[in-house]
Image (cartoon, helix red, strand yellow):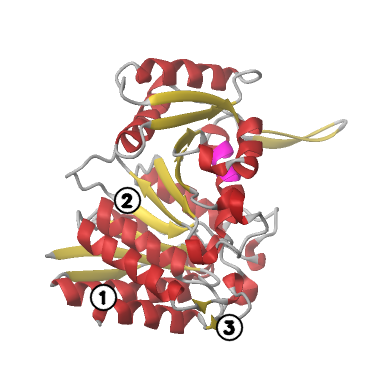
């Protein structure tokens, strides 16, 4: 089979981890007889330096012509000046909006061999395996008015958290569809005791639940959810929430797995259903880690597992995706670790070596 893939390496360690994911992808293609045509583009800081825009028009056009997008990471201190007119993250937000990527999926799974890699007690995190569904194109990050101004009493700024019924309904449906294919349990996270947008969210979620009588819906306030993620993370199976809450909670949840370098993500333009391929963008949840760039240190597993999600959701290659996931688990089982998940008695390897090991398991 033939597939067209847009590759946006980005900034910092992005090019390094993206290269390892491509290495594993090509090994998968060789094993199963698929051909992946790669199309490279600029985004983020490197795009600002070269074109003046965080998301050049050519990049967006190329992405729209492909079957999926693989992204490394964007940002870095070089472009952090708050007075700058353009920031690397602007490119990421524009890409999500331009491609209609409204549903961000972030699975959190604790590998048994990494149970000692976190700061939490093993008995708390043993068996953790849930998935966050984060709304990605609404809320505070996109709401208007959004501005900053000077007054006689000093500077002021405003951001707006806005949601429509339609935006809430489609993301909640993603959560229900995923829950239906798992353990039929969905937690909807909001702040309905304070926010009007959350009250609408809860109302719409309750209405959508009527179409999914086989799925148990639980409403949970965001602060209670933050506490429960640490106190009893095995309580969760599928969680759905709005943009800002999801951004914060998923970073918190990443620590359950020991490192952000272990967690993938998929940003989809549709509701995932069995047998339907959906356009999506796939990226690790970690940032560009500029201090690690060029040192062959970054953990590529999150990007490799993101690529596995791409095989499943956008290419319909479930067996191939499972093969990649099994290869990752086998390499970890053999004791190989990057610096961020290293523990006593294990074998420390770099970015390239980890990619070689995983690709080798697929090709072997």
Q: Position of residue 312 (x, y in %)?
A: 26, 54
- Sequence-first disc among 2 and 3: 2
* Numbered label attached to residue 26: 1
Residue 42 visible somewhere in the drawing: no
Neighbour class for label 1 at 10 Å: few (<14), some, many (≥20)?
some
- Sequence-first disc among 3 and 1: 1
- Sequence-first disc among 1 and 2: 1
Q: Which residue is mark 3?
A: 295
Q: Which residue is mark 2?
A: 280
**Which residue corresponds to the image point at 27% horizontal and 66% vertical from the top-left?**
323
- Residue nearer the viewer, 270 or 110: 110
- Outermost residue, front direction? 123
Q: Report if the CB atoms under discs 1 and 2 are less than 8 Å apart.
A: no
Picture quarter containing residue 341? Answer: bottom right
The secondary element bearing badge 2 is classed as: strand
Q: Position of residue 98 (x, y in %)?
A: 37, 45
In the image, residue 336 above or below residue 7: below
In the visual, does 331 lie left or right of 291? left
Numbered label tally: 3
**Which residue corresponds to the image point at 55% horizontal and 54% vertical from the top-left?**
89
The secondary element bearing badge 3 is classed as: loop
> In 3D space, how far apart are the residues under numbered discs 3 and 1 (Cα atoms)?
24 Å
């Amino acid at each position: 089979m033939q597939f067209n893939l847009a590759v946006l390496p980005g900034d910092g360690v992005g090019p390094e981890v993206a290269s390892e994911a491509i290495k594993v992808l090509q090994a998968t293609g060789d094993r199963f007889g698929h051909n992946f045509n790669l199309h490279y583009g600029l985004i983020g800081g490197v795009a600002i330096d070269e074109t003046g825009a965080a998301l050049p028009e050519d990049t967006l056009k190329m992405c729209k012509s492909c079957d999926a997008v693989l992204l490394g990471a964007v940002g870095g201190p070089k472009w952090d000046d708050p007075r700058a007119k353009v920031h690397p993250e602007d490119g990421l937000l524009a890409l999500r909006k331009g491609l209609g990527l409204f549903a961000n999926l972030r699975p959190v799974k604790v590998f048994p061999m990494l149970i000692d890699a976190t700061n939490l007690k093993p008995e708390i995190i043993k068996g953790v395996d849930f998935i966050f569904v984060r709304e990605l194109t609404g809320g505070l990050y996109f709401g208007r008015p959004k501005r900053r101004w000077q007054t006689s009493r000093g500077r002021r700024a405003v951001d707006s958290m806005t949601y429509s019924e339609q935006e809430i309904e489609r993301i909640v449906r993603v959560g229900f569809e995923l829950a239906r294919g798992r353990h039929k349990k969905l937690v909807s996270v909001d702040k309905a005791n304070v926010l009007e947008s959350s009250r609408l969210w809860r109302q719409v979620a309750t209405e959508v639940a009527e179409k999914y009588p086989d799925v148990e819906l639980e409403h949970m306030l965001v602060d209670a959810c933050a506490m429960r993620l640490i106190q009893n993370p095995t309580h969760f199976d599928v969680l759905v929430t709005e943009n800002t809450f999801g951004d914060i909670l998923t970073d918190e949840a990443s620590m359950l797995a020991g490192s952000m370098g272990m967690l993938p993500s998929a940003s989809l333009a549709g509701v995932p259903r069995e047998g339907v391929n959906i356009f999506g963008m796939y990226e690790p949840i970690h940032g560009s880690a500029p201090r690690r760039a060029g040192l062959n240190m970054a953990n590529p597993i999150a990007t490799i597992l993101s690529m596995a999600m791409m095989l499943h959701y956008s290419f319909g290659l479930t067996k191939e995706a499972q093969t990649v996931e099994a290869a990752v688990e086998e390499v970890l089982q053999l004791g190989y670790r990057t610096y961020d998940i290293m523990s006593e008695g294990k074998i420390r390897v770099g970015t390239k070596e980890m990619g070689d090991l995983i690709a080798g398991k697929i090709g072997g």
